[in-house]
Image (cartoon, grey):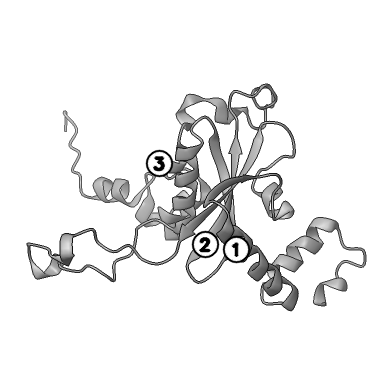
Amino acid sequence: FFFLVKYPIMPAYKYLEELWRHKQSDALRFLFRVRAWEYRQRNKICRVARPTRTDKAHRMGFKSKPGYVIVRCGVRRGGRKRQNHRGMVFGKPKHQGINQLKFERNLQSVAEEKVGRKYGNLRVLNSYWINQDATMKYYEIIMVDPSHERIRNDPRINWIVNPVHKHRECRGLTSAGRKSRGLRKKGHRANGIKGGSYRAAWLNRNSMRLKRYR
């Protein structure tokens, strides 16, 4: 491989990262097929003993110590069909679309929300992709137990104990949620989201503020 020149003795996590980067290699394609079959036999949401992608999980904030939980979640792929009886919209032709509509958030944030609802006593920290087939996408979600002593005493993670972080996945505060809100930009590209969101930016531009004494 090309990266052997840069790293004569490659670190373990770098080796894993490069393996996962070549997803169309024979080894990974075989692994994905076998694992997708296994995931189909199990529940859509289930706890796993250890992360499938160790390097990615640690980059996303996972620590191998008590208080951290990994949960796998499968989400059905595709768009979102409008829920209308027999596809009938009693309105204008503009609103009569049924089939080719897309959900506003990405499937990764949907997976985080599903897991957050099932494990209500845990907090969603982050998530990452692990597999997909023709009908499903599978993600692993990193959960943190806010009532665990090891979490509450760790100054690097005990921010998540604060009650304002309850169900942060439902409010678009995780990495996947911020991406679907368009908050991954910086500089002049972020002019449309000044103030925290495009709605805040729009309101700011379209509001007239007049001082009392002018």
Residue drawn at (47%, 57%) of the image: 75
Q: Which of the labelled discs sits on residue 171, or is there none?
A: 3
Left or right: 71, with 17 as reference point: left
* Three-letter code for the amino acid on which mark 1 is drawn: Asn
Which residue is farthest right?
Answer: 9
Q: Which mark is residue 131?
A: 1
Q: What element does badge 3 sit on? A: helix
Q: Going by the image, does 77 lie left or right of 205?
A: right
For mark 1, give the secondary structure. Answer: strand
Q: Residue at x 42, y 55 (%)?
A: 180
Q: Do the residues labelled 2 and 1 touch (CB within 8 Å)?
A: yes
Disc 2 is placed on an element classified as strand
Q: Give x and y (percent) for residue 82.
A: 24, 61
Mark 3 packing: few (<14 Cα in 10 Å), some, or many (20+)? few
For badge 3, the amino acid type reads Arg
Q: Decide: marks 1, 3 in contact (CB < 8 A)? A: no
Q: Of marks 1 and 3, which one's residue comes earlier in the chain?
A: 1
**Residue picked out by circle 2:** 137
Q: Nearer the viewer, residue 202 or 73?
A: 73
**Mark 2 vs mark 1: which is more N-terminal?**
1
Q: Pinpoint residue 74: horizontal percent, then vertical percent.
A: 51, 56
The type of residue carrying mark 2 is Lys
Q: Can residue 152 be seen in this view?
A: yes
Which tag, 2 or 3, sits closer to the chain's start? Answer: 2
